[in-house]
């Protein structure tokens, strides 16, 4: 366990506050089972926290947040999995809605366990077609991918059109001055299904109309 702890604090944690068993095993050059046992010992000593199977965190790290676990949870879903925080979670982080969602919404390119409840938060994964996966960058902490304001809104509209009642009642969205409205239109244009494009365009028009009413009432 000493060797795992030494490598963990010297190499793994300086890079990110959340990590996987496989990352540690590769760095220490031991088997995954052995690395898991050592990490379990550190968790029992309250030095790290087990987030999910194969995923761990140093919750005392100032860079840590529940969002920082997203890359490691995606990695646990399969090698090369891509994804980012989006939908209501990203809208809230960007200040476009006032509500703070109870779950962290993640858009990904492959199917993971739909809802994952962990000691640090609950995560909900949504599969997105590869041609529509994009429009995100690392957040200011550098620990997770975050959809830009326009992509977060597009993703929300996209699932509201495809998932029926689940996102039928969206929170009131505020569109600040300078919001990149053209980006939302451009993402809608990438949708292959014509009926879905029409549904998205209608929802987008409704959001813009509502935002315009908000601005007029506040003047």
Image (cartoon, rainbow, N blue to C red):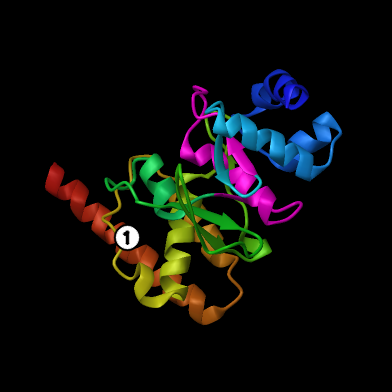
The residue identified by callout 1 is 207
Q: Residues within 10 Å of mark 1 (few under 14, many from 20)?
A: some
Nearer to me, 36 or 58: 36
Nearer to me, 62 or 119: 119
Q: Residue at x 79, y 37 (%)?
A: 25
Q: Residue at x 50, y 73 (%)?
A: 197
What percent of the width, then of the height, locates residue 137?
A: 59, 40
Left of 131 or right of it: where is 210?
A: left
Left of 54 or right of it: where is 31?
A: right
Nearer to me, 70 or 95: 70
**Residue 69 in magenta?**
yes
What percent of the width, then of the height, locates residue 155?
A: 49, 59
Q: Which residues are magenta?
A: 55-84
Q: Residue at x 47, y 39 (%)?
A: 66
**Residue 126 in magenta?**
no
Left of 24 or right of it: where is 171?
A: left
Q: Residue at x 70, y 25 (%)?
A: 8
Residue 151 vs 191, above or below: the answer is above
């Amino acid at each position: 366990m000493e060797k795992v702890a030494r490598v963990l604090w010297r190499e793994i944690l300086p890079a990110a506050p959340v990590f996987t068993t496989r990352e540690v095993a590769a760095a220490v050059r031991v088997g995954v089972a052995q690395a898991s046992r050592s990490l379990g010992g550190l968790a029992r000593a309250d030095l790290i926290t087990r987030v999910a199977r194969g995923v761990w965190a140093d919750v005392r790290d100032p860079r840590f947040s529940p969002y920082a676990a997203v890359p490691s949870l995606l990695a646990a879903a399969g090698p090369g999995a891509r994804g980012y925080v989006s939908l209501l979670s990203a809208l809230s982080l960007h200040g476009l809605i006032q509500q703070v969602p109870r779950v962290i919404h993640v858009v990904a390119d492959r199917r993971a366990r739909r809802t994952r409840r962990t000691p640090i938060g609950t995560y909900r994964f949504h599969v997105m077609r590869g041609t529509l996966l994009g429009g995100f960058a690392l957040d200011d902490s550098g620990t997770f991918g975050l959809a830009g304001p326009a992509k977060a809104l597009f993703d929300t509209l996209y699932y509201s059109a495809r998932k029926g009642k689940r996102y039928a009642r969206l929170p009131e969205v505020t569109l600040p001055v300078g919001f990149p409205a053209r980006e939302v239109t451009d993402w809608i244009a990438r949708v292959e299904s014509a009926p879905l494009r029409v549904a998205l365009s209608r929802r987008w028009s409704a959001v813009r109309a509502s935002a315009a009413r908000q601005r007029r009432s506040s003047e």
